[in-house]
Image (spheres, grey):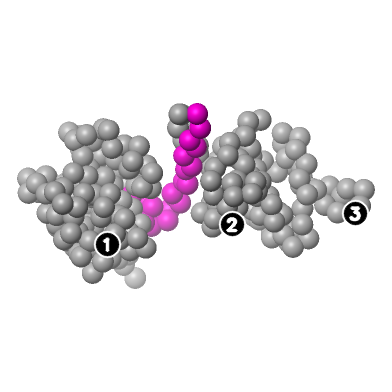
Amino acid sequence: MTTPPIRIVIVDDEPLARTSLLALVERDPEIEVVGECGSGSKAIETIRALRPDIVFLDVQMPGCDGFDVLEQLGAATPKAVIFVTAYDRYALKAFEAEALDYLLKPFDDARFRRVLERAKATVRDHHPRPFRLMIKSAGRVTILGTEEIDWIEAADYYACLHVSGKTHLIRKSLADLEAELEPFLFCRIHRSAIVNLERVAGMQLDANGEYEVLLRDGARLRLSRTYRETLQTKLSR
């Protein structure tokens, strides 16, 4: 069986920009361009109808910009969204919108190929897309890769991230985080705790005959019987 092509939609209000992107994309035999759009409103309609795998999305468009497009699409948002713009001031907002990448015009062919290969890998699930968190505190924004997290505990309406001896609060429930985190890297061990499997050093019975999870930094976390089998299965892979 042949692998189906990766389907792409290009959105830009400048015809020349669409033509340039089309010329770059069509060099790749794995790609099929299924649509081009010159406005945000048309992009919403086209993406909903065609369900592409990847969209190259201009930021600044009259009436409905790239961020408006994603907000309107909701669950219909393609697996890989790449913003294309001449303005670097939108980079943080693009990250908040969970874009895969951000192409800043003018870009060279090598930069474009790297972005396209990353998008293809995301679609094909060759390399699962890393999930990143943005922590806002005291006027500062910290971008945190999930692989940096040691463990996470529930803190009312927040989650407390333990990272190399430091803690960060994020306004997400533990259940929401569990649904977003990479299942091959994280495991729920208690109703109030999730661990990074790479940080687990072992398991040990406590004085009450209950298991604790031992982390490499010396932390000892309670392991609920409900999650014991799942943890053991993941650790044995």
Q: Residues within 10 Å of mark 3 (few under 14, many from 20)?
A: few
Q: Mark 3 near mark 2, Cβ–Cβ under 8 Å? A: no
The three-letter amino acid code for the residue at tag 3 is Gly
Residue, disc 1:
52
Is residue 46 visible from the viewing direction of this image?
Answer: yes
Which residue appears at 77% of the width and 53% of the height? Answer: 223
Which residue appears at 69% of the width and 52% of the height? Answer: 192
Q: Quadrant of residue 29?
A: bottom left
Report the side of 202 relative to 168 (left or right): right
Callout in the foreground (2, 1)? 2
Q: Quadrant of residue 17?
A: top left
Earlier sequence position, callout 2 versus callout 1: 1
Q: How many marks?
A: 3
Using the numbered discs, state the Cα–Cα distance from disc 3 to disc 2 in whole angstroms: 28 Å
The three-letter amino acid code for the residue at tag 2 is Ala
Looking at the rendered structure, the secondary structure element under dot 2 is: helix
Q: Quadrant of the C terminus?
A: bottom right
Residue, disc 2:
175
Which residue appears at 25% of the width and 55% of the height? Answer: 69
Mark carried by residue 209: 3
Write down the region rendered in magenta.
Answer: 119-138
Using the numbered discs, state the Cα–Cα distance from disc 2 to disc 1 in whole angstroms: 29 Å
Q: Residues within 10 Å of mark 2 (few under 14, many from 20)?
A: some
The three-letter amino acid code for the residue at tag 1 is Pro
Residue 182 percent across, percent down from the top left: 53, 52
Residue 22 percent across, percent down from the top left: 14, 51
Residue 178 percent across, percent down from the top left: 57, 55
Is residue 10 visible from the viewing direction of this image?
Answer: no
Q: Nearer the viewer, residue 31 or 149?
A: 149
Against 47, residue 116 (above or below) is above
